[in-house]
């Protein structure tokens, strides 16, 4: 309640003062919170690291996390510094929804950038039957806009895409023509050549014997709109057969769930002692998703768009779709044919037995190498580490 009152007061104040206070062209305000499934806006984080080195930009950073590297530039929500930054920043950069990432933002005379949090497999915004009502130009949303701030999707001056297919889909989803193919800033992190040091850090965290050089299988399931059955996430870790398989093959199984479930997920594992294995671990948000992908030898996912990023590494992907029909019925429709190997280049499995078989086969010699390479070209116009530079230069060109 107190937070809502603060938002209303700040929003009315910002709207009123925006008629008297001018924005500064070189002042940019960026939020590194709210990055889709990771709870941490990794596109915004990567871009922040890049912009911070640009002396011509007065960068201000919003984050609820205590990130030491950005301490000097960070501002506290609803403080006087925050009010000043919101009023005077010309460029506003977010990765999710502007009204959530930069509360009580200034709408007048600002450039609004949505980096978005990745290439989508499931339908988003106005393309999704279950989601579009949230963003409709309804009386309620106009009231929200007046009271606490609300950014309609067609108000963004830039929305990122990695390829022409998603560009077309996003123009419809955002009801916005300003979707441009520039690549994702976070993939600069993914392609950075520091795999060994990142792997060592993860192994140290979980006290894994680095000398044995175990292979890493990462499991990144997506968010469900409908009520989730907790056991669905545990069926792998409950399987003695799966645990024995990991031990025999010397594989480490790293789980990073969507942030919506993350806290409860970790607590449940701790409370119920579900793991009972030295080969299964749950990663917290102290590790970037891109760093996890970087050290992974194989990715297991369901309907998450994270696999689009993983294509850049040309490593095996397994699609664990145990609830495919239920997901389509109760959660989201998908943009593509899920079982088209040209779109999802990897085996589709629905039970633990087939998952074990597919991991064994793909880790030995992937039968999808050619299709992975083709999908990489289809979904990534750029396959370099210059995404931050392209995005930065494009933003500077807007006015």
Image (cartoon, rainbow, N blue to C red):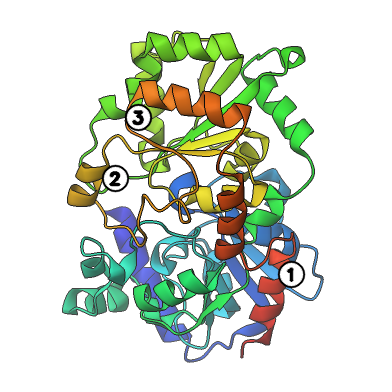
For the residue pair 34 and 17, the one nearer the viewer reads as 34
Report the front residue among 235 and 154: 235
Residue position for label 3: 264
Name the spot of residue 95 as percent of width and height, x first: 50, 62
Q: Residue 311 versus residue 80: which sits nearer the camera?
A: 311
Name the N-terminal-most of marks 1 and 2: 2
Q: Indicate the secondary structure of the residue bearing disc 3.
A: helix
Q: Position of residue 105 (x, y in %)?
A: 45, 73
Name the secondary structure under disc 1: helix
Q: Residues within 10 Å of mark 1 (few under 14, many from 20)?
A: some
Q: Are marks 1 and 2 in contact (CB under 8 Å)?
A: no
Residue ID for mark 1: 389
Looking at the image, can residue 187 be seen? Answer: yes
Residue closer to the observer: 149 or 35: 35
Q: Quadrant of residue 377?
A: bottom right
Which one is closest to the eye, mark 2 or mark 3?
2
Q: CA distance from mark 1 to mark 2?
A: 34 Å
The image position of residue 28, as x and y in percent, is: 63, 73
SS label for mark 2: loop
CA–CA distance in space, label 3 to label 1: 38 Å
Q: Earlier in the sequence, mark 3 or mark 1?
A: 3
What residue is rendered at 78% in x and 32% in y? 197
Residue receiving disc 2: 224
Q: Name the quadrant of the C terminus.
A: bottom right
């Amino acid at each position: 309640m107190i937070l809502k009152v603060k938002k209303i007061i700040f929003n009315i104040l910002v709207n009123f003062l925006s008629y008297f206070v001018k924005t500064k062209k070189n002042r940019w305000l960026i939020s590194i919170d709210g990055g889709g499934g990771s709870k941490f806006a990794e596109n915004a984080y990567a871009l922040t690291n890049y912009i911070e080195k640009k002396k011509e930009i007065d960068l201000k950073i919003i984050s609820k996390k205590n990130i030491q590297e950005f301490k000097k530039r960070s501002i506290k929500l609803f403080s006087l510094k925050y009010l000043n930054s919101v009023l005077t920043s010309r460029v506003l950069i977010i990765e999710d929804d502007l009204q959530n990432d930069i509360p009580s933002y200034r709408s007048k005379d600002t450039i609004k950038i949505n980096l978005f949090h990745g290439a989508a497999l499931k339908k988003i915004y106005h393309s999704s039957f279950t989601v579009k009502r949230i963003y409709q130009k309804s009386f309620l949303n106009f009231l929200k806009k007046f009271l606490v701030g609300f950014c309609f999707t067609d108000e963004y001056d830039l929305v990122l895409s990695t390829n022409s297919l998603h560009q077309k889909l996003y123009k419809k989803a955002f009801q916005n023509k300003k979707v441009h193919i520039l690549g994702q800033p976070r993939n600069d992190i993914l392609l950075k050549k520091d795999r060994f040091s990142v792997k060592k850090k993860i192994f140290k965290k979980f006290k894994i014997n680095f000398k044995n050089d175990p292979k890493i299988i990462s499991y990144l399931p997506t968010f469900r709109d409908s009520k989730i059955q907790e056991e669905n996430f545990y069926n792998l870790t409950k399987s003695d057969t799966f645990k024995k398989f990991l031990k025999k093959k010397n594989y480490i199984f790293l789980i990073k769930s969507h942030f919506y479930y993350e806290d409860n997920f970790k607590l449940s594992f701790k409370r119920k002692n579900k793991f009972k294995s030295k080969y299964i671990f749950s990663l917290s948000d102290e590790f970037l998703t891109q760093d996890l992908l970087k050290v992974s030898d194989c990715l297991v996912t369901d309907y998450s768009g994270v696999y689009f990023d993983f294509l850049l590494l040309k490593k095996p992907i397994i699609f664990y779709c145990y609830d495919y029909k239920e997901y389509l019925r109760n959660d989201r429709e998908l943009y593509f044919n899920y079982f088209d190997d040209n779109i999802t280049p990897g085996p589709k499995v629905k039970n633990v037995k087939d998952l074990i078989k597919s991991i064994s086969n793909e880790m030995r010699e992937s039968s999808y190498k050619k299709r992975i390479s083709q999908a990489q070209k289809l979904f990534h116009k750029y396959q370099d580490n210059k995404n931050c530079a392209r995005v930065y230069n494009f933003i500077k060109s807007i006015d």
